[in-house]
Amino acid sequence: MQLLFLTTITYLLVAIPNFADGFLSHTLCSQSISTRRMQLKASIYAEEPWKLSSLPGDEAIFILSMISEDDIRRTTVESYLLDGLARERTLLPSGSPWDREGSSFVRRSREHLRLIGEVVQDDAWEIYVCAGCRPLEDKPRQLWACVDMTVQFSRVFAKFDEEYQREAQHAFQ
């Protein structure tokens, strides 16, 4: 049975070379359509970032990673993060401290970005290997977006923490 399967696959790949090309192009075409849909969705949320807060965190962060224009993505990411932090802050009892490391929003956001970044990195590696380990003409923008967002998350969280601490000091003086 296994021999028949291997013989069939070998025949399809060797004797009918267009079979593999057709399968690959169909797969790439499906990915391309899906990517275009997500890019359209990302552009809508980039114009109205407040709508991201209505989505599950992993979906919101995935959409943010699809915004290819750095300045627009950075502005949208900052808006999304500050909105989430402000919502979390309103849930704290009055006068209680906010702790960046104890923040469930910060932990969930970082975890979602880490998981999305791993998948994007694995996809980029697969594309690179499928291209014969040659430099890619179309650089993986989403991979760069995840790296950039990692830096931005740290910056926004630290800035929010500093402002919160400053406000807390002024409140008790």
Image (cartoon, rainbow, N blue to C red):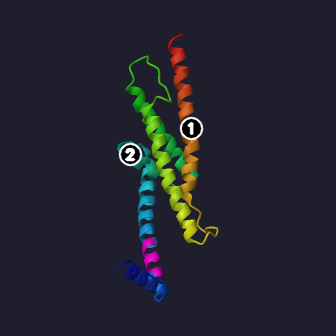
The residue pinned by badge 1 equals 154
Distance from label 2 to label 1 (Cα)?
Answer: 22 Å
Residue 165 vs residue 8: left or right? right
Quadrant of the rendering where the C terminus is positioned: top right
As displayed, is residue 164 above or below residue 65? above
Q: Residue at x 53, y 28 (%)?
A: 161
Total count of labels: 2
Q: Which numbered disc covers residue 70?
A: none
Residue 32: x and y in percent read 45, 68
Residue 36: x and y in percent read 44, 64
Q: Residue at x 45, y 47 (%)?
A: 61
Give the camera-side residue of 10 and 31: 10
Q: Residue at x 55, y 55 (%)?
A: 143
The residue pinned by badge 2 equals 51
Q: Amino acid at mark 2?
A: Lys
Boundaries of the magenta span: 20-27
Q: Is residue 35 visible?
A: yes
Residue 55: x and y in percent read 36, 46
Please report whichever mark, 2 or 1, sits nearer to the chain's N-terminal start: 2
As displayed, is residue 99 above or below residue 32? above
Q: Amino acid at mark 1?
A: Ser
Q: Residue at x 58, y 54 (%)?
A: 144
Residue 37 vs residue 129: left or right? left
Q: Nearer the viewer, mark 2 or mark 1?
A: 1
Residue 101 vs residue 90: left or right? right
User: Disc 2 on helix, strand or loop?
Assistant: helix
Residue 82 vs residue 1: left or right? right
User: Disc 1 on helix, strand or loop?
Assistant: helix
Q: Quadrant of residue 3?
A: bottom left
Q: Is residue 26 magenta?
A: yes
Label 1 crowd (10 A; few <14 / some 14-19 / many >=20): few
